[in-house]
Amino acid sequence: MKNTPFTQKHIALGAKMAPFAGYNMPISYTGINDEHATVRNNAGVFDVSHMGEFILKGENALDLIQRVTSNDASKLEAGKAQYSCLPNENGGIVDDLLVYCIEPNKVYMLVVNASNIEKDWNWISARNTKNVEMHNISDKTCLLAIQGPNATKILQQLTEVDVLNLKYYTFVKGTFAGVENVLISATGYTGAGGVEIYFEDKDGAADKIWDAIFEAGTPKGLKAIGLGARDTLRLEMGFCLYGNDIDDTTSPLEAGLGWVTKFTKDFTSKSTFEKQKAEGIKRKLVGFEMIDKGIPRSHYEIKDAEGNVLGFVTSGTQSPSLGKALGLGYVATSHASLDTEIFIAVRDKLLKAKVAKIPFV
């Protein structure tokens, strides 16, 4: 099992540790509900150094990205990022990712899911037919996400870069806590505001940055947050998690990701998605709220009142912000409209739920 440069920090803070995507990661410190509320109302720090980062360089870098991703990366200027998908050849999704434009047409950074680093690298490499220079910098890149409405106020004192006014899906590079060449981006996964900081752990940079953040933030209530609260926060926003809500068998259109599927260029499975768009999809990822008492869990069947299977739950939890159980799941398009009554099969019971608007909060 791999460690991040912050593993000993988590253990010293009393974190409950568990394996995740091959890494020893903090799941919670003081408890998921407490950590969730900290991020929604104030600020928290997530160690997400397990994520993958690839650098693509050269005159054909954009061409490669355009062919393997669903969104249109030609629209990106320097300092802009976009959410996208890597479609497979059967109309499913290899992974979802972020594309950062460092130098238009020349230098890009792709940020991929921890569990898919090798899979994505192999997928993109196999399609690199025009000698794009590729570097997998995952193992040497640290990534901290400082999220919450007060996150940028706390961090501003640590950098001359204007983080207070960093627009969503933009990034800057600068000195942070005395460490040079830190990439600061506003592409958070919690819906609570804040930034992510990418940097290389050399000359003690990881300790320096972690300590500076907590020195500045602890008096203001900033806390370390585990992956448990990261999941409840993203679920309240209706953000897809790869391996749960999207995978090799789900199409971006079914998952509500038509907005990152641009037909103005050629890319893998384009014709499949065009056909789906023209004919209409047969199932759709929806949000739902429980009416009856019970927690929906991944893979539970979703049924109609007669017990006919409509689909399945992909993610579910008790929402700390709303105090009710909610989830995401695929249902037949006939049952995807808002407020449609559906039932979640929990053991031998059918628990009533209704299709709800995303985001939940």
Image (cartoon, grey):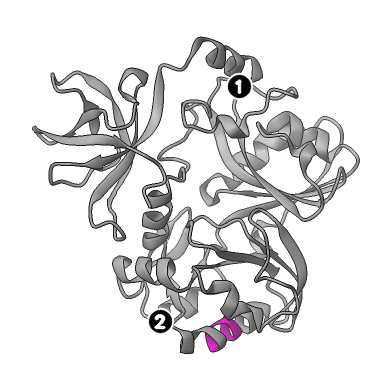
Q: Position of residue 163 (x, y in %)?
A: 67, 70
Q: Circle 2 is placed at which residue position?
A: 13
Q: Quadrant of residue 228?
A: bottom left
Q: Residue at x 82, y 33 (%)?
A: 63
Q: Position of residue 24 (x, y in %)?
A: 45, 64
- Seen in the image, is 48 located left or right of residue 297? right
Amino acid on which the number 2 mark rests in the picture: Leu
Amino acid on which the number 1 mark rests in the picture: Glu
Under circle 1, the secondary element is loop
In the rendered view, tell whether residue 269 sits above or below residue 67: above
Front one among 79 and 70: 79
In the rendered view, tell whether residue 130 sits above or below residue 143: above
Front one among 170 and 32: 170
Q: Closer to the N terminus: mark 2 or mark 1?
A: 2
Q: Circle 1 is placed at which residue position?
A: 89
Q: Residue at x 67, y 67 (%)?
A: 165
- Seen in the image, is 257 located left or right of residue 79? left
Q: Quadrant of residue 202?
A: bottom right
Q: Residue at x 56, y 87 (%)?
A: 216
Identify the magenta region: 210-215
Q: Residue at x 73, y 84 (%)?
A: 178
In the rendered view, tell whether residue 127 sits above or below residue 166: above
- Seen in the image, is 191 located left or right of residue 312? right
Res. 127 in view: no
Q: From the image, give the main secondary structure of the stretch colored magenta.
A: helix
Residue 325 numbered mark, or none = none
In the rendered view, tell whether residue 180 sits above or below residue 187: below
Q: Position of residue 265 (x, y in %)?
A: 75, 24
- Seen in the image, is 77 located left or right of residue 90? right
